Amino acid sequence: MQTTTLSFENLHNHGELFANLFRARKQSFIVQNNWDLPEAMGMEYDQYDTPASRWIAVHDFGEVLGGMRLTPTTARCGIYSYMIRDAQRGLLDTIPHDLLYGEAPVDPHVWESTRVFVSHKTPMGIRRRVHAYMVEAMTRSARELGATRIIALTAGNWERWYGRCGLDAEAIGPMLKIDGGDFQCVSINLTAKLH
């Protein structure tokens, strides 16, 4: 099992991995979760999949076991910036606009984590290890990009497993019901992971 952080600059070095990540996202978010999201050629994508973002893939022999996207909070593409901020600004009708206690940050040291998933094909016996690999790659990649903090809209049970993964996090918004599940915005402090 290995992790790879993909960008538009390096995806040509990794064969089908980038496409396989987007195929796994389709399986996870469109097929499994039944979310109404854009898709093409068997891949899920959205307006935040731009050259500003990075994608983390945990994979084994070409099969994507889990992944996520990191986007700088300074990103801009037309009317869009990043998912949490755009929801707060009322640009996304699927996420409530009152998801944060304060103003969504626009800061080069703050990145957003989205589209976090573990493939339904990933055996139960290695899921914790996949989570650990994702957290380690997210932390390393975000620090290399200059981030001191990551924000995310995550499952409401985050407190139960973030600590096990070694993440220092706090709630930055209320608990929300989205698509029948509990979700909450959190801030992950990376300053303790500077070295």
Image (cartoon, grey):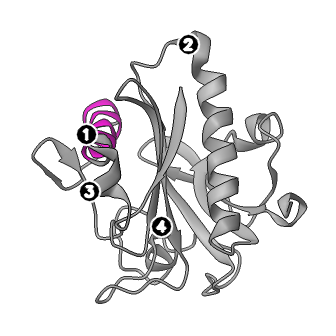
Query: What residue is drawn where x is 53% and y is 86%?
Result: 74
Query: What residue is drawn where x is 49% and y is 12%?
Result: 123
Nearer to us in this view, 124 or 84: 124
Q: Indicate the position of residue 8 as horizontal and vertical percent values.
A: 34, 66
- Nearest-to-viewer mark from 4 and 2: 2
Question: Looking at the picture, does residue 7 appear above or below residue 85?
Answer: above
Label 3, secondary structure: give it: loop
Q: What residue did someone put label 2 on?
A: 124
Label 4, secondary structure: give it: loop
Q: Is residue 54 left or right of residue 15?
A: right
Q: Earlier in the sequence, mark 3 or mark 1?
A: 1
Question: Can residue 13 be spotted in the picture?
Answer: yes
User: Mark on residue 23?
Assistant: 1
Q: For the residue carrying disc 3, how many other residues have a C-alpha within 10 Å: few (<14), some (14-19), or many (20+)?
A: some
- Nearest-to-viewer mark from 4 and 1: 1
Distance from Cα at disc 4 to Cα at disc 1: 27 Å
Label 2, secondary structure: give it: helix
Distance from Cα at disc 4 to Cα at disc 2: 32 Å
Nearer to us in this view, 61 or 76: 61
Q: Is residue 172 left or right of residue 15?
A: right
Distance from Cα at disc 2 to Cα at disc 1: 21 Å
Q: Earlier in the sequence, mark 3 or mark 2?
A: 3
The image quadrant that residue 15 belongs to is top left
Q: Indicate the position of residue 16 as horizontal and vertical percent values.
A: 25, 41
